[in-house]
Image (cartoon, rainbow, N blue to C red):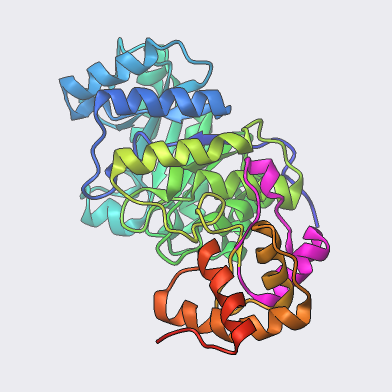
Amino acid sequence: MTDNTGAVTIHDTTLRDGEQTAGVAFTLEERLDIARMLDLAGVPELEIGIPAMGAREREEIRAIAELRLRTRLVVWCRMHEHDLAAAQGLGVSAINLSIPVSDQQITRKIKQDRGWVLARIGLMSARARDLGFEVCIGGEDSSRADPDFLMRVVEAAERAGARRFRFADTLGVLDPFATRAIFERLRGGCSLELEMHAHNDLGLATANTLAAILGGATHVNTTVNGLGERTGNAPLEEVVMSLHQLYRCATNISPQSLAAVSQVVAKASCRPIPVNKPIVGSGIFTHESGLHVSGLLRDPANYQSLDPRELGRSHQLVLGKHSGAAAVCWGYRQIGVDIDESRARTVLPRLRRHAALTKRQPTSGELLCFLAEDAVGGDYPH
């Protein structure tokens, strides 16, 4: 299998598509904080807003640009003269010019035809380049476009001097197998940078992003915590760690920065992080099952594919209904009491009843009570 993961650029759009999550709106200070943190984490490109939204949006884009971050800043525009004019003078040198490329959206959304789209790409790309912008052509609804017409779109973008083509799976309708095949065809037909913009409607955004890379994508869009329209975009934390773990592909993004960025974005967006959220969830290194805990205590590699230390985390063991004798012995050692596995097994029924009644793990005092009850033949009270 050909491995095309040697050079991948993460282009994070938390401050554009992420903020398009229904009900999410960042303050200026929140936008600045998020931009700084993403820059410190090593994210090389940020899409930071939509100039045509108005004067306030432009002021905030300009404020981010004035931070003089190391990351490359990009703004998003439609292929309208007004949008191009709004993007000028903001301190940003790269622009994504978006246009529908599926027949559904060409005819039913913008009420044009394929010829108009191809001509518009040539015209607006030239004007954007004359204004000093590096141009990415964004193909809205690329995944529902006719494949042959999509190739004509890419060819038009290349002729017009665009640097990059963004393939948008706008409705999240692709699977990884189709995604890889599409990108292999695109890669074989042009020399442009190719960018994948995946939506998560079927829960496949991360998988489709990785498949696009295997097919030849050079750039991929992400959002922190997977924010975005409807079910969101490919999560930054998942894409980064999948590239690191599965393909040993260096993104130059610090894994230990991911949790802090995630927390800041969760607070600013008022979207709490699920406990079991991959990479950044609070419970992803927490174990209760007796089989797993016993294996981890013998050797973490028994049940560890992702080293929590790489993320600045550690394994947490919890005593509960599914604990085994080895975990109980471990739990008592944590409070300075040594018991053998035979004694631990006599404590287990009390522990399991406690878990069912209280829905939490026992305190050190309760653990001592379990031992005392066992010594006198008592039982944990109902």
The residue sitting at the left extreme is 55
The magenta region covers: 288-317
Residue 282 belongs to magenta span: no
Viewer-proximal residue among 22 and 111: 22
User: Does the magenta portion include 305?
Assistant: yes
**Quadrant placement of the N terminus:** bottom right
Q: Depth check: give the residue in front, 255 or 292.
A: 292
Q: Position of residue 155 (x, y in %)?
A: 53, 39
- Residue 185 visible? The answer is no
Q: Is residue 94 left or right of residue 267?
A: right
Q: Report the residue at 23% width, 38% height from top.
A: 25
Residue 277 image offset from top left, x and y in percent: 49, 57
Whether residue 90 sits left or right of residue 125 in the image: it is left
Give coordinates of residue 311: x percent, y percent.
63, 42
Q: Residue at x 51, y 34 (%)?
A: 11
Residue appearing at x 77%, y 78% in the figure: 341
Drawn side of residue 5 relative to residue 14, left or right: right
Q: Judge whether residue 65 can be spotted in this image.
A: yes
Q: Is residue 303 above or below residue 20?
A: below
Query: Residue visible at 78% across and 69% down?
Result: 295
